[in-house]
Image: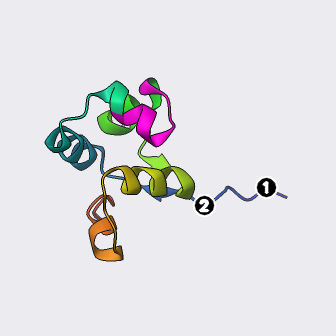
């Protein structure tokens, strides 16, 4: 029997990079604000790690000041 995978959120790394840069944050500044490593943030933005845990997604949204569900959805990967 397979162990269920924890829930994950598929995030649009390009959109994340664009919003981070609009805030004027460097990778290092934003990673520190979100409580994640610079390497991990870079992988997310490049699309190498498109799925993040819900807590990480929440911290990213909070750091970007995306308050409501509609604003938070702007970071979700669009369905193909």
Which picture quadrant has residue 33? top left
Residue holding disc 1: 3
Segment tinted magenta in the rendering: 30-38
- Graded by Cα atoms within 10 Å as few (under 14), some (14 to 19) or many (20 or more), the crowding at tag 2 reads few
Identify the main secondary structure in magenta: helix
Which mark is drawn over residue 64? none
Q: Secondary structure at mark 1?
A: loop
Instruction: Pinpoint residue 15: horizontal percent, then vertical percent.
Output: 22, 49
Q: How many marks?
A: 2
Q: Is any part of residue 43 visible from this angle?
A: yes
Residue holding disc 2: 7
Residue 32 shown in magenta? yes
Q: Viewer-nearest of labels 2 and 1?
A: 2
- Graded by Cα atoms within 10 Å as few (under 14), some (14 to 19) or many (20 or more), the crowding at tag 1 reads few
What colouring method underlies this structural image?
rainbow
Residue 33 shown in magenta? yes
Q: Is any part of residue 53 visible from this angle?
A: no
For the point 60% across and 61% down, which residue is it? 7
Instruction: Pinpoint residue 20: horizontal percent, then vertical percent.
Output: 24, 42
Split into 4 quadrants, where in the image is the N terminus? bottom right
């Amino acid at each position: 029997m397979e162990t269920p995978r924890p829930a994950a959120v598929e995030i649009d790394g390009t959109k994340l990079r664009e919003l981070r840069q609009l805030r004027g944050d460097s990778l290092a500044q934003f990673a520190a604000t979100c409580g994640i490593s610079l390497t991990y943030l870079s992988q997310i933005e490049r699309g190498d790690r498109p799925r993040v845990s819900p807590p990480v997604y929440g911290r990213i949204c909070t750091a970007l000041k995306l308050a409501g569900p509609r604003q938070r959805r702007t970071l979700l990967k669009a369905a193909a």
